Image (tube, rainbow, N blue to C red):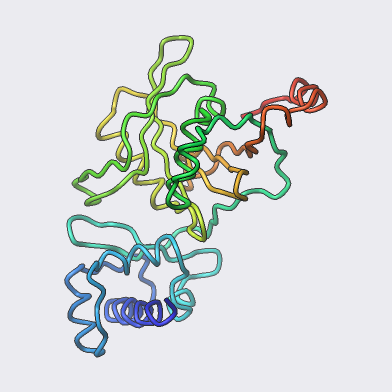
Amino acid sequence: MKAKLNRYSKIIEHLFFSHFAEGMREVVFEREEFEQVAAKLGIKLPKNLGDIVYSFRYRIALPESIREKAPKGDAWIIRPAGRGRYCFALIKERVITPNALMAETKVPDCTPGIVAKYLLNDEQALLAKVRYNRLIDIFSGVTCYSLQNHLRTYLSDIGQIETDEIYVGVDKRGAHYVFPLQAKGGSDKLSIVQIEQDIALCKAKYPSLICRAVGVQFIEKDLIALFEFEEGEKGVNVSAERHYRLVAADQVTEEDLEVYSHRVIYA
């Protein structure tokens, strides 16, 4: 794994500096350049070229030599820029991580035992636990239904994108919602870029629905953080965060319920 990431770092670093000039805030490159750079550096490419970009978008930091070219308070990210094109872009430095001071809420775990037994990976486990425990409903206050898993589509200004799951919902007024969901397990991190893409997806494919973009992440095996995002003048921001701990039904005590009954929900 370390050797693979070192190869990826050399490729992405060479790509960046072959286009970068001081003062630039966007650096565009083509997917096909991976092969040219790898041949020049004598590096064996992975079968899936997309794994290079995916690694730096969601798993690991860009090489320090690239990060150093960001002004103080900014950070480089990689965005899709159309079919077969990507763009290094500067944004205000923001990291999506669970707030360690956030109170937990216990939820009786309704994940079917046979499903829990055969879950294959962290992301699949996370999506299943969110779905079977209706955490999107609880978090949003809207009655929700899973519409599609791993939706892949093409947006003209962005290129191909994938959303982990799409929920649709209805509230007591009868208003309809769409909840694009990004899920991260293990060491993967939620990405502002993915949230931006989810919002763009909803505008293009579900223009009449109210879009509420959501991210979910394991904190521990049965402790799940949910985030809601909104677009503002400074880009995408977190508008709400909750932490839900899945427990056996008898572990939700009278004392817990007393605490929950007096909570004031601000968002």
Side of 30 relative to 178 (left or right): left
Task: Please tell me which residue is depicted at 48% across the width and 30% down the height of the picture.
Answer: 132
Determine the image quadrant of residue 58.
Answer: bottom left
In the image, 116 versus 162, the foreground residue is 116
Side of 261 relative to 23 (left or right): right
Task: Please tell me which residue is depicted at 36% across the width and 34% down the height of the picture.
Answer: 166
Side of 13 relative to 139 (left or right): left
From the top left corner, tell me how far across and down residue 47 is, in percent: 22, 71
Image quadrant where one finds the N terminus: bottom left
Determine the image quadrant of residue 6.
Answer: bottom left
Q: Is residue 199 above or below residue 188?
A: above
Q: Please give the count of numbered marks on the rendered protein.
A: 0
Task: Please tell me which residue is depicted at 55% across the width and 29% down the height of the picture.
Answer: 110
Q: Is residue 76 above or below residue 190?
A: below
Q: Residue furthest top?
A: 173
Q: Is residue 146 above or below residue 61?
A: above
Image quadrant where one finds the C terminus: top right
In the image, 22 versus 132, the foreground residue is 132
From the top left corner, tell me how far across and down residue 59 is, in percent: 45, 64
From the top left corner, tell me how far across and down residue 233 is, in percent: 47, 43
